[in-house]
Amino acid sequence: MTLPYENATSGKNAIAEMQKICQKFGADDFGIKENFKTGNVLVQFEWNGRTVQIEANAKGYAAAWLREHPYTNRMRTTKQQHEAKAIERGNIAVYSILRDWFKGQVTAVEIGMLTFEGAFLGQILLPDGRTVLEHAESKNLLPNMEGE
């Protein structure tokens, strides 16, 4: 079985698409930040005075890819080369994942399926720099769903 996005090729071109979607949606600004050490990709935009921050991790995708494609001694590469390939796949896939998720959320808002807040609530930034989701988690506002 293949992992979704493992054959993605658009890479950073997906961010350019995301920026175009943002402009068409009426966003006031758009930016991206990459942390090469951690593999985090942070996308931020502002719409009607609300700042939204979406974060994804290329290394997280690489770990999922390695679970799907574990290294074996029968491969024609070293374990390090195999792990490097996973990171490379993650660095490409993470952009397409962000674009597609964002495109789906914006489309849901545009067709009236969700409000802006309903689509992006967890990613809306509060004045203290945390997202609404981070705030809710820190205050234990979310119900414990385990065991139900």
Image (cartoon, rainbow, N blue to C red):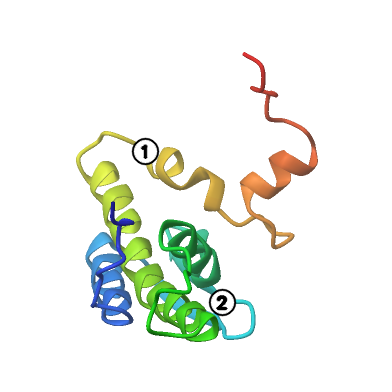
Q: Earlier in the sequence, mark 2 or mark 1?
A: 2
Residue receiving disc 1 = 115
Residue, x 36% and y 77% (percent of image)? 92
Residue receiving disc 2 = 39
Q: Nearer the viewer, residue 130 or 2?
A: 2
Q: Is residue 140 left or right of residue 62?
A: right
Q: Nearer the viewer, residue 82 or 27?
A: 82
Q: Is residue 97 visible?
A: yes
| Residue found farthest to the top | 148
Mark 1, Cα crowd under 10 Å, few <14 / some 14-19 / many 20+, is some
Between label 2 and label 1, give the one nearer the viewer.
2
Percent coordinates x, y for residue 25 in the rendering: 26, 60
Judged from the image, the secondary structure of the residue bearing numbered disc 1 is loop
Q: Is residue 146 left or right of residue 7?
A: right
Quarter residue 127 falls in: bottom right
Quarter residue 40 falls in: bottom right
Residue, x 64% and y 84% (percent of image)? 37
Percent coordinates x, y for residue 20 in the rendering: 24, 73
Q: Nearer the viewer, residue 10 or 49?
A: 10
| Residue found farthest to the right | 139
Judged from the image, the secondary structure of the residue bearing numbered disc 2 is loop
Q: In the displayed structure, would residue 132 be above or below residue 47?
A: above
Q: Is residue 132 left or right of residue 117?
A: right
Q: Amino acid at mark 1?
A: Thr
Percent coordinates x, y for residue 57 in the rendering: 53, 67
Q: Is residue 28 visible?
A: no
Percent coordinates x, y for residue 72 in the rendering: 47, 69
Q: Amino acid at mark 2?
A: Gly
Query: Which quarter shows the C terminus?
Result: top right
| Residue found farthest to the front | 74
Mark 2, Cα crowd under 10 Å, few <14 / some 14-19 / many 20+, is some
Q: In the displayed structure, would residue 18 be above or below residue 147?
A: below
